[in-house]
Amino acid sequence: MSAATIAMIALVVFVWGLFSARLGRADLSAPIIFVTAGLLFSHGLHVVDPEQSREIVKLLAEVTLVWVLFADAARVGVRDLRADLGMYARLLAVGLPLTIAAGALLAVWLFDGMGVWPALLIGAALAPTDAALGAAVMTDPAVPDRVRRIINVESGLNDGIATPVVMVAIAGAAAAESVQGEGPGAALADLAIGLAVGIVAALVGGWAMRIARRRGWGSEDFAGPAVLALALAVYGGALWLDGNGFVAAFVAGIAFGNAAGRGDAKEVFYVEQTAGLVSLLTWLLFGALAVPIVFAQADWRVVGYAVLSLTVVRMLPVALVLIGAKLSPPTVAFIGWFGPRGLASIIFALIGLEELGDDGEFAAAVIGTAVLISVFAHGLSAKPLANRYAQNAAGTAPAPPDAPAVPHPPVRRLLHHHPNAAHPRQPDEGNA
């Protein structure tokens, strides 16, 4: 990558920093801007060479996913989950597997000759949601706080839960296509090692941070970079022991967030900010490298699958698992629609493309098509639909006085795009 390319990419990041609030008010989110910039750099200005950028993409995708998984998981504590445990159990323990299964079955049915493993890769990669694509929803104080909290926490956890399924699917596809790989059985063993490494390392690291903070051993200014390094150390340590580094990073975030104490807020925020920066670069490279593949392979079946994935495959399982949750039909539809596909999905696609080579190109094209449509559909519809839903919600009865009054946890995606996202509480809608 040339010096001119680096300078132009850095300039785009700087300009976004100058005008992000104004562009956000115009419904132009960071993914929309950076995907468009990446496509312009690749096919307009020709300053990004796809072949020379593959190794950079792989490294950037892996590091981004590590920090995203760690930061998102660290932000969601046990108390936050306890406030609406039944709701999260419905969405994550039942709704997410149903979404993965529905996406895989749809891929097998729609794409002739597609095997089970590539279909599972597509279904699992497109199951996680990214609240950043609907940031106007999350920062609108008129939207009931409980609804924002549900979307926020679900987005923070479902990418980590889907990661093991994606990795097993990639391993199975590699074995089935005779690509160098260890198969799904070995992948499950890797997941177990990653789980153990993540829990042990983060508990020890969180305990050490708590002790160091209490006794004044470490500089407060360097606490954030230390946690950033801890996330990478967990990832690298899991790989060194032949474990899955992504699973290790996710469970490490959960363990660290509950072992380091409440003083971890600023430390994790530094990880969130750093992950936010590299996520912008990932979106740009997605526009430069993956969108051309999407355009080359996006026939009516690929586009049709993407549309169904963003609507029926997501919204029907959400509607089913929320039966009896005492939420109004507009609220159920609102939660179902605002499940944008974003950063985690494109990183899974890039990893699959890297691991499977040409055999992963079609799966990457399907995933990329869904993400590309989601970037614009959810980004442009967030503010109008949030305003309309808020007007309807204002006419509903407020929550009972004993409803849980726990503010939604500030997940990394939201803090990056809207650092001043704190708002007065609004009446929650119903009880779980």
Image (spheres, helix red, strand yellow):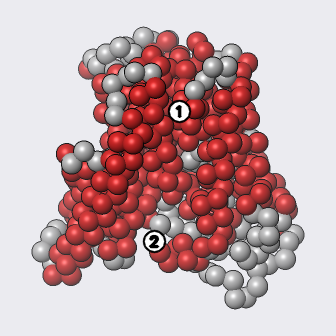
Q: Residue at x 15, y 78 (%)?
A: 216
Q: In the figure, is residue 190 to the left or right of 32? A: left
Q: Which residue is mark 1?
A: 117
Q: Residue at x 73, y 52 (%)?
A: 317
Label 1 crowd bin: few (<14), some (14–19), many (20+), radius 10 Å = many
Q: Which residue type carries mark 2?
A: Gly
Q: Nearer the viewer, residue 89 or 173?
A: 173
Q: Position of residue 70 (x, y in %)?
A: 37, 56
Q: Which residue type carries mark 1?
A: Trp
Q: Residue at x 65, y 39 (%)?
A: 103
Q: Position of residue 72 (x, y in %)?
A: 44, 57
Quadrant of the image occupied by residue 206: bottom left
Q: Above or below — where is 162 with respect to 372?
A: below
Q: Secondary structure at mark 2?
A: loop
* Residue 77 circle label: 2
Q: In the figure, is residue 294 to the left or right of 70? A: right
Quadrant of the image occupied by residue 262: bottom left
Quadrant of the image occupied by residue 252: bottom left
Q: Above or below — where is 186 with respect to 228?
A: above
* Residue 327 circle label: none
Q: Nearer the viewer, residue 174 or 142?
A: 174
Question: Mark 2 or mark 1, which is nearer the start of the sequence?
Answer: 2
Q: In the figure, is residue 105 to the left or right of 40? A: right
Instruction: Answer yes or no: is residue 425 visible.
Output: yes
Spatial CA span between label 1 and label 2: 33 Å
Instruction: Answer yes or no: is residue 368 visible.
Output: no
